[in-house]
Amino acid sequence: MKLLIGNRNYSSWSLRPWLVLAHFDIPFEDEVLQLAGEGFRDVLAQRSPTGRVPLLIDGDLQVPETIAIIEYLADCFPDKPIWPQDRADRARARAVSAEMHAGFTALRSYAPMNLRASHPGRVSADMIAKDLQRLEHSLGGLLSRSGGPFLFGAFTAADAMYAPVATRIRTYALPVSDTLNDYGAAIYALPAFQRWLALALQEPWIVDDDEIDVIQGVAPRGSLA
Ligand SMILES: N[C@@H](CCC(=O)N[C@@H](CS)C(=O)NCC(=O)O)C(=O)O
């Protein structure tokens, strides 16, 4: 299997299925496609049917869309606890995963994933207040049910879906509860996440669209080194 991914520093969608593959010890290779630079969209369009990453390639099969990739992995490896074992928990895990896929647009737009950056206080809490409230309620509820450290006790695909939230909390020092900060720390402590992070921190590339200074008009495009 091969996973086409975007720049590790920025590509929150790529991180999610990559974590599932890496955490559950599924043999795979990956390849980074650039999310900026001249002609990058042409390359994406040539390599991926949706023009987006992540894309899972398994023989002749191409699977785009993060949720579909994760479901395919769960189908291929039924012995691996990618989703919770309990049926009701599985439904809860799929529901919060679908919610992340479809929602949290303010958080995703105003606080883009940027692993190497540290911008405490740069994202107005008002702009993302509804998303933070929902995270506190939804993740807080699951963590108190399970007792942590992950949403359903052990790490599952639902945690992979929320891993980029942990990075946003850290990059922007978002005002969240101890429960969410502890959850973020559990994500950061995961060996698979540490592997991704180490590789991300070696990347030299800048994606202007995901840089807060560019988004907030503090720095012109192309000016960041
Ligand atoms: N719905 C897609 C979203 C994938 C997505 O938006 N990926 C971004 C990178 S994180 C991308 O490929 N962007 C390409 C572009 O902006 O042209 C999924 O679930 O995988």
Image (cartoon, grey):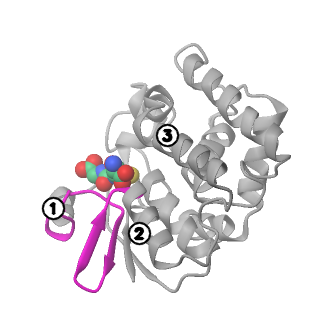
Query: Which residue is labeled 3 in the image?
Result: 100
* Residue 149 placement (x, y as % from top left): 81, 52
* Residue 25 placement (x, y as % from top left): 61, 81
- Residue type at the position of mark 3: Met
- Residue type at the position of mark 2: Tyr
Point out the residue furthest to the front here: 87
Q: Quadrant of the N terminus?
A: bottom left
* Residue closest to the eye, 187 or 95: 95
Verify whether residue 207 appears in magenta.
Answer: no
- Residue type at the position of mark 1: Ala
Q: Nearer the viewer, mark 2 or mark 1?
A: 2
The numbered mark, 2 or 3, whose residue comes first in the sequence reads: 2
Query: Which residue is labeled 1 in the image?
Result: 45
Going 60% across and 40% down the picture, which residue do you hit?
A: 168
Label 1 secondary element: helix
In the displayed structure image, the side of residue 96 where residue 210 appears, left or right: left
Q: Is 128 drawn above or below residue 8 in the view shown?
A: above
The numbered mark, 3 or 1, whose residue comes first in the sequence reads: 1
Going 68% across and 67% down the picture, which residue do you hit?
A: 194
Label 3 secondary element: helix
Query: Which residue is labeled 2 in the image?
Result: 72
Q: Is residue 202 visible?
A: no
Badge 3: residue crowd in 10 Å (few <14, some 14–19, many ≥20): some
Going 42% across and 31% down the picture, which residue do you hit?
A: 109
Q: Is 210 drawn above or below residue 204 in the view shown?
A: above
Point out the residue furthest to the top here: 126
Q: Magenta stretch?
A: 45-66
Location of residue 76 by image quarter: bottom left
In the displayed structure image, the side of residue 9 where residue 120 appears, left or right: right
* Residue 65 placement (x, y as % from top left): 33, 56
In the displayed structure image, the side of residue 101 where residue 159 appears, left or right: right
Q: Is 183 drawn above or below residue 30 in the view shown?
A: above
